[in-house]
Image (tube, helix red, strand yellow):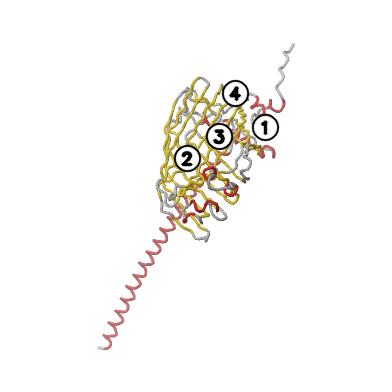
Amino acid sequence: MDDVYHFLQLKRMKCYTFNLSVKLLHQKRKRIFILLFMITGLGSSHAQLDSLALKLVDSLKAFLIDEQIPKKTFKDKFMYPHRWYVKQLLKPTNSDLDSTYIRSLKHKLTLALPVAKKYYGFNYTDLGNSKILRFSPNNYYYVGFNIGNIILNFGFYPGIRFGAKPGRGNTRMKDLQLTLIGRRVITDVNYQDYSGFYLFNYRDYSATVPDMNTILIRPDISSFFFGVNTMFVFNYKKYSLRGSFSFTDIQRKSVGSFMAGLYHSYFLGTSDSSFIPLALRNEFSPELRTINRISIYTLGLSAGYGYSFVYKKIILTAAFNIGAGAQINNYETNDKVGHALPINASLHLNSKAAIRYDNYRFFVGLMSNYSNNYALSPRLFNTETYTARLVLFCGYRFNIKQNGRKVLRTLGLVDYNNPVNKKGPAKKARPSK
């Protein structure tokens, strides 16, 4: 019996060992199968990535490498990116503009002389006592230059300025009011960093303050403002804002267009003690007497309409955009304690106007723009910032279709494969006798 029992136990152990071996073999096969699947998948994915990378590289090479531009000598290699860039600029394009409404003059050299007056300031209003302080910098008139051709169009002000008001203090400023005008999109960028203001409406308090100099000049007040307003022009094929606010287009017929876009702005105003002068503390609410720092964030959507009226050589343009959005006001007091006011609704106004006489060569005119934010439900106090610019300009366009080509040829940017460029025009062969 013992022999039979040991025989059965040995047989059971062999069966268990065999089943365990089969299970391990199955698990090993599964692992091998999964590993092979992963290797195959990774291989195929790497192959797809390599294929995409090769296609991308081939596309970049086809776009950047031009076999017609020489690349043999060191000079050719150095000039290659410049020649390639000029070739892209001079490449003929199929414009979808309606030439009966818009005439493009970007192929001419335009020289203009603008005289600009920039306006900027902010208002500080006590809602409880209906009192307002209007702070303004002591600004100047600026004389600048504008140059435009097929390659570049830019304007600058070299520091020629005049017209500051005496007795209004000195203002240190960094002011950039830039308008980027495209065919479909127009963007206004305003950047103002001012230090040193004066009280613009000081006459409102002349009866209560004997010495006006104590409240008039505020060298301790500084402000920073940054705002961007972008608009999309729907009827861009017929309506050109360039025709009124730049010098590369001319509007030939009266037409208008709807516009839509978005805007964003940030304002920060600071003072050493308080925005309210010491001589006027009793005129304002106690909660406002120690405020020395205010910040405002604004964001919203806008819509508007622009129209250009054309009468012979005179172009009159007006464009208005009204936006609606949200505004966040924060302020700080002399004890360095910050406070936040509830978010409220606000309105945004952006307007442009221009009048110009233009006979395709000589032009003269006046253009302006204005931008402001209005809080609809302010609490405790209200702060409004505004930016504006008035520009008187005159200019002349030079026809450089031939001379401009000569300049580019002299610089080696065009006709670099033409032997005429290097050796001069070929002489005519004399007829044989």
Q: Earlier in the sequence, mark 4 or mark 1?
A: 4
Identify residue for label 2.
230
* Element assignment for label 3: strand
Residue 357, located in which quarter of the rendered image? top right
Q: Earlier in the sequence, mark 4 or mark 2?
A: 2
Dot placed on the residue nearer the N-terminal end, 4 or 3: 4
Tell me if I can see residue 71 in this picture: no
For disc 4, the neighbor class at 10 Å (few under 14, some 14 to 19, many from 20) is: some
What amino acid is labelled 1 in the image?
Gly
Q: CA distance from mark 4 to mark 2?
A: 30 Å
Q: Quickly name the residue at label 3.
A: 390
Q: Can you say whether 128 is above or below 148 in the image?
A: below
> Along the line of sight, which residue is nearer the eye, 201 or 24?
201
Pointer 4 residue: 362
Q: CA distance from mark 2 to mark 1?
A: 39 Å
For badge 4, the amino acid type reads Phe
Image mark count: 4
Q: Quadrant of residue 11?
A: bottom left
Label 4 to label 3: alpha-carbon separation:
20 Å
| Dot 2 amino acid type | Thr
The percent position of residue 391, horizontal first and vertical second, equals 57, 33
Tell me the kind of residue under disc 3.
Leu
Q: Which residue is mark 1?
A: 412
Work out whether residue 320 can be spotted: yes
Work out whether mark 3 precedes mark 1 in sequence or the reverse, and give the earlier one: 3
